[in-house]
Image (tube, grey):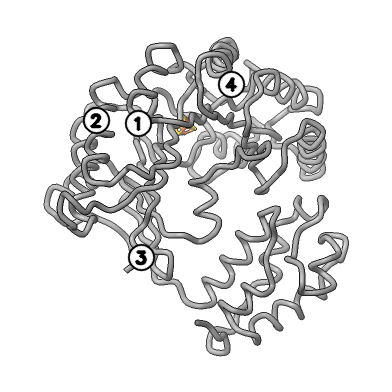
Amino acid sequence: MIWPRSVYVHVPFCRKACHYCAFHFSTTRSSQARVLKAMVRELDLRLPDRGSVNRWPMETLYLGGGTPSLLEPEALTYLVNGLFEKFDVSSLQEFTLEANPEDVHPKNLELWKGLGVNRISLGVQSVDDRFLEAMNRAHDSRQSLEAMRLLASDWSGPWTADLIYAYPDQDPESLKKDLDTILSYQPGHFSAYQLTQEPRTVLHTRVQRGDVQMPEDDKALELMHLLYQWAESQGYRAYEISNFARNGCEAVHNSRYWSGQAYLGLGPSAHSFDGEETRSWNISHNLHYCRGIEAGAPEETLEVLTMVDRLNEFLMIRLRLDAGMPWDELTSRFGTDAKDRVRERLLTLSPSWFREEGFLGEAQPLRLSRSGRGLADYIASSLFDDIPDQTQGT
Ligand code: SF4
């Protein structure tokens, strides 16, 4: 059995419900203590016992959500100690905590550092107060600026900022202002996600009603190109389609997702992957989650990926990476026939969407060009395989 060396913990509480958010969270915190207890207990249920002297190694830990930074010191300490007790953390490389700007202040930074957090992911989203207010964020731009100032001056480890672009009424000037402002604090890494209207969100309802208009595709694409140009000019590499890093500042934990490694997810709605073919996810309901764990039987859904699922996922994820999709890895994992079918489909697509090397030959990975990046999902799905019984694999 491959035991995951990366752990994701979903803390399902937020101060306010952002109007675009489709993650699982609750703004009622009455169940917080019970949920945290259940998360620590979940570890007992999932972790095969190796005895106290031979614990499982954990190399990356990501506390996400939700808003883990809103946990009070006792609550966060309880959770982190509960996790650390069960693992060998002597080789822990990266421990990321997602934080919202309103929670970043000197006392919390000290607490987080003392608990072993060595990377902060800050949810800035934008410095445009009209957008923050319209999306019901719990902070304003003043708080974001102060949080970034503190991270730049008082935080010794790496940090990253999350940004949303292509929101209603955003023009190139306002995107540039967001980017320039964030850059002035010199994060080594930032993520930029295009705003999407997910089903069952307030944003979606408003768009359906005609109260809000999302940018047209052309406009969103123009903003995306501006983002890439700006990032490159400032020394950031888009090592993944939505993730930008200066040399050596790439996210270790997330890179493991993208390279198909195993990870364990704890908490309501958290996903796990065994690194081979089985994915599972916990129920997205705090009380049902607690009841399942307390009864010793987590409420979860299991999915066993077929070879075709795995191939298509491989294409989808690898094409999002700047490193691209290596042809030799495709062949060794899925067989020559599958590779030939992908190649056949590839030749029906526009060469301008790819960098020449991996498009014309197979010695180099297949990589998207800048124009291809705007169509990544479409391109990957055009290459998808759909012949399960002919697909070879190891
Ligand atoms: S803070 Fe994050 S998880 Fe919570 S509602 Fe907003 S976007 Fe969603």
Q: What separation in Å lies between label 3 and label 2 (alpha carbons)?
A: 32 Å
Q: Earlier in the sequence, mark 4 or mark 2?
A: 2
Q: Are marks 1 and 2 in contact (CB under 8 Å)?
A: yes
Residue 191 at x, y percent in the picture: 62, 37
Position of residue 160 relative to residue 283, above or below, is above
Residue at the disc numbered 1: 13
Q: What's the residue type where badge 4 is placed? A: Leu
Of the pair 259 and 118, the residue shown nearer to us: 118
Residue at the disc numbered 3: 2
7 vs 254, left or right, is: left
Q: Are marks 4 and 2 in contact (CB under 8 Å)?
A: no
Dividing the picture into quarters, in which one does residue 145 lie?
top right
Residue 298 at x, y percent in the picture: 22, 55
Q: Residues within 10 Å of mark 2 (few under 14, many from 20)?
A: some
Q: What's the residue type where badge 2 is placed? A: Gln
Q: What separation in Å lies between label 4 and label 1 (alpha carbons)?
A: 19 Å
